[in-house]
Image (cartoon, rainbow, N blue to C red):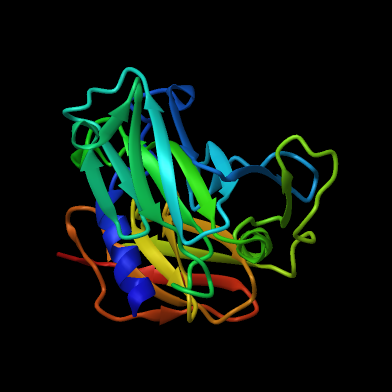
Amino acid sequence: MKAIIRAALAAALALALFAAGALAEDEVRIAPAGAQAVEVVDASGAPVTRAYDMTISAFYLVGSDRAELRISAAGADPATAAFYSNFDSTATALDELARDGGDYLASTGVDSLATTGFESTMVAVMPGGVASGEFSGCTLLFASESDLDAFCRTRVGSGASWRFAGAAEDVGAETAAETADYALVFVDGAGTPVPGVVATVCDDANCTIVTSGADGRAAFSLAPYAYDVHVMQVPEGYAAPAEDYVLPAEGGELTIALAAA
């Protein structure tokens, strides 16, 4: 239940998840004090730069359930821009944060599978404020190496491994465990694809947010599981189904017909 509630809050806050941020990615830097920067690579050895359907700027192994952050956001209007953490789905205006020179200071709890059931915490700057739904400098924080391993096994479609930044060889996370391919297809009563539908795909501990594209499809790969699917948001003119759906454990496609509002 907590996973579903948290996903719902995240979906409501990120209505424009795919919109381009008001600041370039290299204008925002978020660094946790005392943490180790890590690199995540896919099965081919290429750097992983996307997770949870968003661009990820950096990965850090915090080694704790709390992180003190230093935020550089040159060009952001502190009266408008906000710091966001999905640990508790909160956003704080930059001008409410303490400052050290040109940097903003913030803190956040850090999720772990052992404590909250989530393997990472995402922090970012929302340059246009919460209403914009735009994120820049998205950074993933991990409390432990085992949480990083779980992320690599289940959250990167082709499988992944990780290493400390600058290291020549991987030091953790074997390349992915088995994954299955899934797709949700959203159509109207006439069978026409419906883009922009936001849904959560949940197991017993975690939820993944997916959004349908122009073809009405949201395709993704996860560890095999009979995932629960809940439609969180639909475009204007449609009604969100009250019922939940279940994906086949072995992978496959599920079509969901949306009724007119």
Which is more toward the observer, 176 or 144?
144
Horizontal and vertical percent position of residue 240: 24, 68
Horizontal and vertical percent position of residue 108: 37, 52
In the figure, is residue 261 to the left or right of 133?
left
Horizontal and vertical percent position of residue 139: 49, 43
* Identity of the residue furthest to the top in this view: 75
Compared to 242, does 189 lie above or below?
above
Residue name at image x 79 percent, y 61 percent = 174
In the figure, is residue 69 to the left or right of 143?
left
Where, by quadrant of the figure, is residue 166 drawn? top right
Which is more toward the observer, 70 or 260?
70
Residue name at image x 48 percent, y 77 percent = 205
Compared to 81, does 214 lie above or below?
below
Where, by quadrant of the figure, is residue 106 drawn? top left
Residue name at image x 60 percent, y 81 percent = 249
Residue 117 visible to an observer of this rendering: yes
Quadrant location, the C terminus: bottom left
Where, by quadrant of the figure, is residue 222 drawn? bottom right
Residue name at image x 64 percent, y 76 percent = 224
